[in-house]
Each structure stands twice: as C-alpha cells, then as structure tokens.
Amino acid sequence: MRPAISRKVEVQRRINGHWRLLGSGVTGRDGTTSGAFTAPKADATYRAVVEAVTKGGTKYSAATSQARGLDLQRQRVVLRFDDSTVDEGDQARAVVYANPIRAGRPVVLQMRSAGMWRTVRMSQFDRHGRATFTITPDLGEDTYRAVARRYRGAAPNLSEAETLTATDVTPPPAPYDLVAVPGDGTVQLSWSRVVPADFARHEVWMRTADTTWSLVSVTESDNVEITLLQNDVTYWFTITSVDTNGNVSDMADEVAATPTAPARTPSSMIDRPPRG
C-alpha cells in the first residue's frame, strides 16, 4: 500500500454478488501485511479495502484495490502398483503421484489392518510430484492408500484405495510310503501324507512300459482303487498333492504292480461224492 504507513486493511471475498469480509490486518511501516486462510471449494474473487484515516495531521482517503481472482488447483493423489499381484516373498513397487507438485511434501503409504489404517512406509515427493515405495507384502490380499501430508498451506489429501495380492507359491509336502496291492484287473493304492491347511486334493498318475504318465484319479483320501486294468500287465503309479492355490508337490516315489486273474482249480481236482 502506498503511501507506506501503518493502517488497517480488510480482505473481502465476493459471494453471491456481494463483498463479504474474509479477514483483516494492519500494515506495517513498509505498507504491507500478510495472512493465510483456507482456500474455498471453488474459484473466487478478492479485494483489499482501507478506510479513510488521519495520521500526523495528514488525511488519507479510503481506497479499494483492484479485484483479483483466485483460480484453484484441485489436489489429486494417485497410488499405483506396478503389479497388483506378486508371488509370496517378492517385492512390490508402489508409485504415488500428486498434483499440484510440491517437491519435498511428505507422503506415507498406509495398509488397512484390523479396521484401521497403519503407516508402513514414509517418503517425500520429488520435483516431478512423484514418490516410490518398495514393500514385501504379506500372503493374501491387502488394501493400501497414500496420504499426502499437510505442507506449506496444502491440506492433507488421500488417494483411492488399491489392493495388492501376494499369492502362495509354496507347494505342499509330497506323499510318501506309497504301496500298491494288485488284484483281478485292479490295483489298490495307499500312502502316507502330511496335510497342510491349504490342502485341496491328491492326483493319482499311472503309466506302463509303453505309455507316459497320465492322470487316472483325483481324491482327498489317502487311498484309492484303480480299476478296469488289464491283467498280466505291469503298471507304475505315483501320487502328488495339490493345494488350493494350484501348487503341486513333487511326485511320490513310484511303485509298480501287476494285476492278475485268480488261479483256476482244475475240474479233475474237484472232490466228488462217492457213487451209491
């Protein structure tokens, strides 16, 4: 303000066609004053007003500044994962973008846990308005968000929530002590096993000397009967375990069995009752 004297000044905002008081202050000897206020939700127009005043016998008239518009920049925080699904134990990279850009602004990555948001990483935005995080997620699906902290007048702002899934890639234990007992056109299989919490099924595989492994049965039990086999042909068998995520164990040690028809008793050896 000129001339530079100490003087009360009001800042007004135009609302619905009328000027409303927003705040006031007193200029210093250099004729300036400053203040901070919360930005409105829409673009707005402002002006400064000083009333008439007498200083040292000198009268200073009232004055009004030129109206100036304030164009708002909408804050936006975006969280993105390079991959929304990773293997168990692998790292995931999260990138956060913020607009408008404020280099040095603090930002945190939070994970939803037990109904609350928990901070898992902290960083700052660079001069491009970007921040990166690297995390090793827990097994399963979790929800994350980014929070840009209050900084140099900018209010805190949140990103949309994003999910990140770490999939189980650990196979279940392989079955062991596989036993095959042949019968007439059949083979009865039984085995020992360790059943993990995510167990889904066993797969039974069979081959002959002239064929490759083929899936012949699926079961949740520790034994199974294979039927409709050809007698006097040797079959090899093995078993695998499969979990609910599709992970397959190593094959059990294979065993062989040869179905055989029961021996027939010659008719000449059948006891006959003596003749009267």
Image (tube, grey):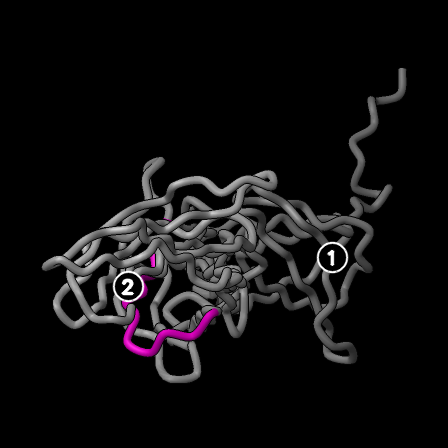
Residue 207 pos. (x, y %): 71, 70
Q: Nearer the viewer, residue 186 or 51?
A: 51
Q: Are marks 2 and 1 in contact (CB under 8 Å)?
A: no
Cα separation, mark 2 vs mark 1, equals 66 Å
Amino acid identity at mark 2: Tyr
Residue in the image at 55% along x and 50% along y? 42
Residue occupying image coordinates x 83% and y 22% = 274
Assess whether residue 79 is covered by the magenta stretch: no
- Secondary-structure class at tag 1: strand
On the image, the x and y values in percent for residue 37 come to: 32, 51
Q: Earlier in the sequence, mark 2 or mark 1?
A: 2
Asked if residue 106 lies in the magenta stretch, the reply is yes
- Secondary structure found at label 2: loop
Quarter-of-image position of residue 115: top left
Q: In this picture, is 260 found above or below 273?
A: below
Residue nearer the viewer, 153 or 181:
153
The mark found on residue 151 in the picture is: 2
Instruction: Read off the magenta span.
Output: 100-111
Image quadrant where residue 177 sits = bottom left
Residue 164 spot, x, y in % from top left: 48, 59
- Give me the disc on residue 216: 1
Tell me what residue is drawn at x 36 percent, y 74 percent. 102
Q: Which residue occupies 86% across, 42% down?
A: 267
The residue under label 1 is which amino acid type?
Val
